Amino acid sequence: MNSINNNTEPLLNVQGIHKAFDKQVVLKNVTFSVNAGERVALMGPSGSGKSTLLNLLSGIDRPNEGKIMLGSTDLANASENELAKVRRHEVSTVFQFFHLLPTLTAAENIDISMQIAGIEENERKNRISELLDAVNLTSHAKAFPDTLSGGESQRIAIARALAHRPKLILADEPTGSLDSKSGEQTLDLLKNLTEKYNIALFLVTHSQEAAASCERTLQLHDGMLVS
């Protein structure tokens, strides 16, 4: 388990978030923090507000009230240019259904996030090689997504998310479309690689097994954190 230094500011600090769509309140006074390199799971029934919270943390949507501090940047009040910079360099997302680009090979899918981040070509090649080895898919470097299994696709998606060395990975039900063996491999990869690179993980899941791979779990019910 990563050690937590209580004398340092958290990487992610969410304070008093409220979110409503028209008159429907979805999130109410949500407050929590995530430290650098920490793995935190978010659980809750369907309709509890998990997806809305994930959209706020990724800067896709904004709260009606409250602050979402990622380092020194308040995502709730950041400009579009600031949010774009955060997405390029500081936050990455792993999705349930992979979202690999179908016309790119596995290696090219990993490369794309680094191109967007402006990383130099030789460094990109080194990282692609390192990550393909880490996810045990070196032999699939030139494979296109439609030739990969679900588990292989998710492993490439994890490599892509890690490639530009973000500070925070948001994982949205990353094992939800996988069989139990592939799901277990995915959780192991997320745990081991985020530890290796000291990247924080915020994992939204319905799975107790997935939550158990994290250091602590938050419970969301009817838009409120209950633990």
Image (spheres, rainbow, N blue to C red):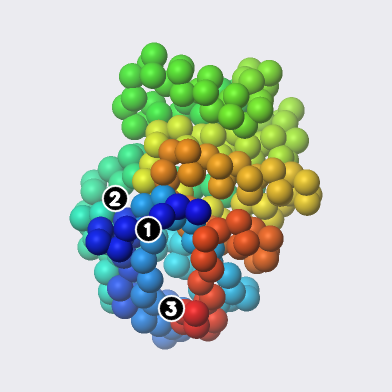
Q: Report helix, strand or loop for mark 2.
A: helix
Residue 81 in the image, given as x and y percentages of width and height: 23, 46
Q: Nearer the viewer, residue 187 or 55?
A: 187
Q: Nearer the viewer, residue 168 or 106?
A: 168
Instruction: Report the residue at 38% width, 19% height from top.
Output: 123
Tell me the residue that label 3 is attached to: 27
Q: Report helix, strand or loop for mark 1.
A: loop
Amino acid found under the numbered disc labelled 2: Leu
Q: Alpha carbon of mark 1 to alpha carbon of mark 2: how far? A: 27 Å
Amino acid found under the numbered disc labelled 1: Ile
Q: Does 123 sit left or right of 111 as displayed?
A: left
Tell me the residue that label 2 is attached to: 83
Instruction: Report the residue at 36% width, 66% height from top.
Output: 33
Question: Which one is earlier in the sequence, the residue at label 1 or at label 3?
Answer: 1
Q: Quadrant of residue 60?
A: bottom left
Q: Nearer the viewer, residue 102 or 189?
A: 189
Residue 134 in the image, given as x and y percentages of width and height: 58, 29
Q: Is residue 75 visible?
A: no
Q: Compared with residue 149, is residue 96 higher up or lower down, i.e. above or below?
A: below
Q: Does 30 sit left or right of 73 as displayed?
A: right
Q: Report helix, strand or loop for mark 3.
A: strand
Tell me the residue that label 1 is attached to: 4
Q: Alpha carbon of mark 3 to alpha carbon of mark 2: how far? A: 21 Å
User: From the viewer's perspective, is the residue at label 1 or at label 3 nearer?
Assistant: 1
Q: Is residue 208 visible?
A: yes
Question: Which one is earlier in the sequence, the residue at label 1 or at label 2?
Answer: 1
Question: Which one is earlier in the sequence, the residue at label 3 or at label 2?
Answer: 3
Answer yes or no: do the residues labelled 3 and 2 have beta carbons within 8 Å?
no
